[in-house]
Amino acid sequence: MKTSLGFFGAGKMAEGILAAAACQKGFDPQTVLMAEKIPARAQELAKRYHVRTTPDVKDVARAARVIFLAVRPQDLAALAADVKPLLTAKTLVVSIAAGKSLATLRKLLGTGVRLVRVMPNLALRAREGMCAICPAKNATPADVKRVAKILNGAGRTVVLPEKCFDAVTALSGSGPAFFAFMEQAMAAGGVKLGLPKDAARLLAEQTMLGTAAYLRQSGADLETFISGVATPGGTTAAGMDVLRASDFASVVAATLKAASDRSAELGK
């Protein structure tokens, strides 16, 4: 059986990427081979997506020409020792290993293999992910196009230099937690105003979702949009006066900087 796509690791992020690939026209699940040591998880994926699985990463290294590296960073060195002798210039490895630079990947996997580094986020699992892509020097434009095509099936992608990845980690990698924290605060504020807890969460969540959808579809300038909603003397203006008088913007900036700094530390 021909293998067109392989996975080192079969966790939730790998499953999100698999779901994205499955959206592509002409996708054949039997050309996918995923390495997973836990039998129950392997059976789950085989049943849900009809892909092939194996407990041995070497099987994937031998068979696949495009491989998503989706193991925990702390497991990368051991995996690399197993697969490095099997990887060649014909192999494209797409790494989503957090904090592992292209230079580190090159050292672990060998100089011949073609590399693309991706910083995804959890929204991949809802097919609304945001992924930053950085190709190594020996990756081709066709490699980047192929990776973007797969990931675009589960959201959006942007190609950026690797020096931006700590900022990407802070903004979109850690961002889901920060947005959830904001939603939590909005919902809690609604409860204090007398709303039932479930209704407050629904109102906050759908408002966040709908606003993001409108801004993307319209391409509206953010400040113009805010001004348009916050008509003088109205309810939104009253709330915006509180936000603008607070340290909200500086707290958000400090939050992102802390996450970016930590990303840089972990990558050393």
Image (tube, helix red, strand yellow):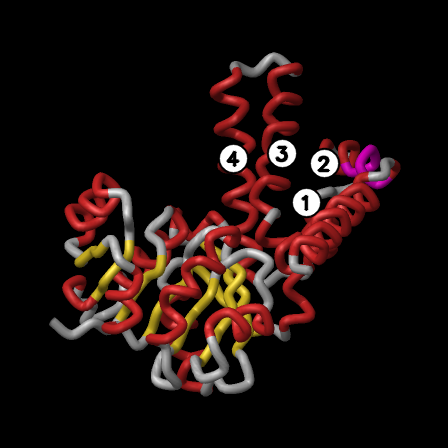
Residue identifier under label 3:
181
- Give the quadrant of the N terminus: bottom left
Q: Amino acid at mark 3?
A: Phe
Q: Is there a contact, CB below 8 Å, between mark 1 and mark 4? A: no
Task: State which tag comes first along the sequence, 4 or 3.
Answer: 3
Residue 134 at least partly seen:
yes
Q: Is there a contact, CB below 8 Å, between mark 2 and mark 1? A: yes
Residue identifier under label 4:
205
Measure the C-alpha gap from mark 2 to mark 4: 18 Å
Measure the C-alpha gap from mark 1 to mark 4: 18 Å
Q: Is residue 89 left or right of residue 203?
A: left
Determine the residue positioned at 36% across, 68% down: 83
Mark 1 closeness class: few <14, some 14–19, many ≥20 residues within 10 Å: few
Measure the C-alpha gap from mark 4 to mark 3: 11 Å
Up/down of 155 relative to 64, above or below: above
Q: Which mark is in front, 4 or 3?
A: 3
Task: State which tag comes first along the sequence, 1 or 4.
Answer: 4
The spot of residue 169 in percent (x, y) is 62, 55
Q: Which mark is in front, 2 or 4?
A: 4
- Give the quadrant of the C terminus: bottom right
Residue identifier under label 1:
229
Residue identifier under label 2:
236
Determine the residue positioned at 29% across, 65% down: 58
The quarter of the displayed image where residue 238 is located: top right
Q: Amino acid at mark 1?
A: Val
The quarter of the displayed image where residue 82 is located: bottom left
Mark 2 closeness class: few <14, some 14–19, many ≥20 residues within 10 Å: some
